[in-house]
Amino acid sequence: MKTTAVFPGSFDPFTLGHQAIVEKALLLFDELAIAVGVNAGKQSLFTVDERVQSIKDVFKGDARVRVEPYEGLTVDYCKKAGATHMVRGLRTVADFEQERLMAQANKLMLPSVETVFLLASPEQTFISSTVVRDVLKSGGDASNFLPEIKP
């Protein structure tokens, strides 16, 4: 049986930490759908199209990865994507508590999809989209936090 996992998030922007979670997930699953969430109530630094394209550029040439925008409930996207699993990255204990609550709610809504938590590498636990956005908004160099784009 082919396993398809969904890695949902806003990815504003997509960081080295996100890339590391994707690479770990690809060791476990046949396919990974990176689902870029559209949240009209959230002020994003990058448009959804920019976020989708930047992630596609990082994984260019890897047929196991697809990147798509989505709106609404993540469980609805999981159904559409034929997901067997949902992947969530954890950096801190606070992340775990929030993610556990979401995973339990998602499990009630879609029992066929199991959430898998993958730990961030110790050297990447401080990297968050919020920190990177702040650096970028202030005109700083965020290249140490962002993945390289494949040519």
Image (cartoon, rainbow, N blue to C red):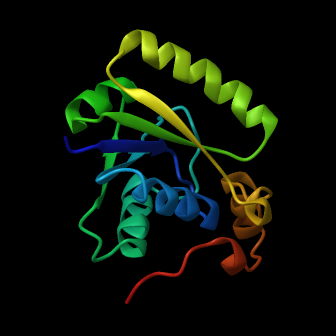
Does residue 151 appear in the picture of this structure? Answer: yes
Q: Is residue 31 above or below residue 1?
A: below
Q: Is residue 94 left or right of residue 102?
A: right
Q: Is residue 23 left or right of residue 83?
A: right
| Number of numbered discs | 0
Q: Position of residue 148 (x, y in %)?
A: 53, 81
Query: Residue at 69% across / 71% down in the picture?
Result: 145
Residue 92 found in image quarter: top right
Q: Quadrant of the C terminus?
A: bottom left
Q: Quadrant of the N terminus?
A: top left
Query: Residue at 45% across / 56% down in the picture?
Result: 47
Q: Position of residue 2 (x, y in %)?
A: 21, 45
Q: Is residue 138 left or right of residue 31?
A: right
Please state which of residues 16 and 49 is positioned toward the viewer in this rendering: 16
Q: Position of residue 95 (x, y in %)?
A: 72, 36
Q: Is residue 109 above or below residue 14?
A: above
Q: Is residue 29 left or right of residue 44?
A: left
Query: Residue at 38% across / 42% down in the picture?
Result: 6
Residue 98 found in image quarter: top right
Farthest-out residue, top: 108
Q: Position of residue 40 (x, y in %)?
A: 47, 35
Query: Residue at 46% across / 81% down in the picture?
Result: 149
Farthest-out residue, front: 1
Does residue 13 appear in the picture of this structure? Answer: no
Q: Is residue 4 above or below residue 126?
A: above
Please state which of residues 151 and 94 is positioned toward the viewer in this rendering: 94
Please state which of residues 30 and 96 is positioned toward the viewer in this rendering: 30
